Image: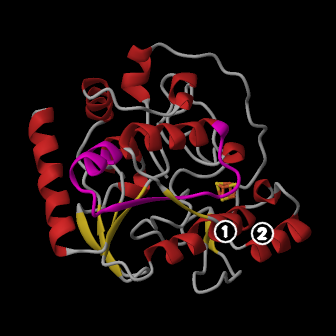
Amino acid sequence: MSLDQKIAEVLSLLDRVQKDYAPAVFASSFGAEDMVLTHLIAEHYPAIKIFTLDTGRLPEETYKLMQEVSDRYGIRVRAYFPESDAVEAYIARHGPNGFYDSVDLRKTCCHIRKVEPLKRALHGKRAWITGLRSDQAPTRKDLAKSEFDAGNGLQKFNPLLDWSLSDVWAFIRQFDVPYNDLHDKGYSSIGCAPCTRAITPGEDVRAGRWWWEDPEIKECGLHPAKGIKGTKGHYRSTIPIGDDPVIAGQNGHREEHPQGLESREPEWRSEKIAEVE
Ligand code: SF4
């Protein structure tokens, strides 16, 4: 299928969402896929509102892009923040970077800074839209373009599910869409600064997210993978977090975050890059 045909399919789906699922929202974390959808929604579907989860640990490049989006499209992306009491309690007990110490503590931090704010962002909505692609991770292989999100109680749409990474970057180039500067520094996926690193050529596009964890289980709770079970090397956490017991692994060793990796050529980037939460 050509890129034009894929774009037409996405527009058709967004049209249906705007008409049949109002109020609908789009969750952006300012990765490349999200910029494709931001462009299409801002240009064609103003009734679909865009929001982001500001965890308080985002990289400066993401705030810069947030401002660029506002300037380019004349829209304001709404930011949802974590509850300050929960963040203060977490830091008092586990320290500012406690998420490196175990998978449970990492998932707890993600719950406080992402999952709970997401629930507020989705409250009262009939549908939400994401920039997930199926080949981003093992945890995303079984997703559908339209599915009921039972955890949040509304319909969830993944319009770019069958897009390749090359499609994403071809779109960005063709329509001169702004994108996160981190992609030019080797970041394939955009997330919180302390939990995201650049990848090296040949690494999986999700390798830079929570790189100390098993790829089969590393999601932040925003997009729970289907069919994850307690398998060899993993266990179900016994730590309840609100209404969402977490799924945890045992390999939570710490690794330092690499800094200052050099920029890479756009050709390399087009093969490797980009993704969201
Ligand atoms: S990605 Fe890291 S800093 Fe961000 S919410 Fe999750 S654990 Fe916390």
Circle 2 is placed at which residue position? 87
- Residue 130, horizontal then vertical, whole percent: 36, 57
**Image quadrant in which you'd find residue 32:** top left
Per the image, label 1 sits on a secondary structure element best described as: loop
> Relative to 234, is 133 on the left or the right?
left
* Mark earlier in primary sequence (1, 2): 1
Q: Distance between the residues labelled 1 and 2?
A: 7 Å
The outermost residue toward the bottom is: 243
**The N terminus is located in which quarter?**
top left
Q: Is residue 1 among what the camera can see?
A: no
Instruction: Examine the structure image and report whether residue 42 is included in the region drawn in magenta.
Output: yes
Circle 1 is placed at which residue position? 82
Amino acid type at image mark 2: Val
Within-10-Å neighbours for mark 1: few <14, some 14–19, many 20+: many
Task: Identify which residue is drawn at 36% across, 51% down.
Answer: 131
Count of marks placed on residues? 2
Q: Give the range drawn in magenta.
A: 37-60
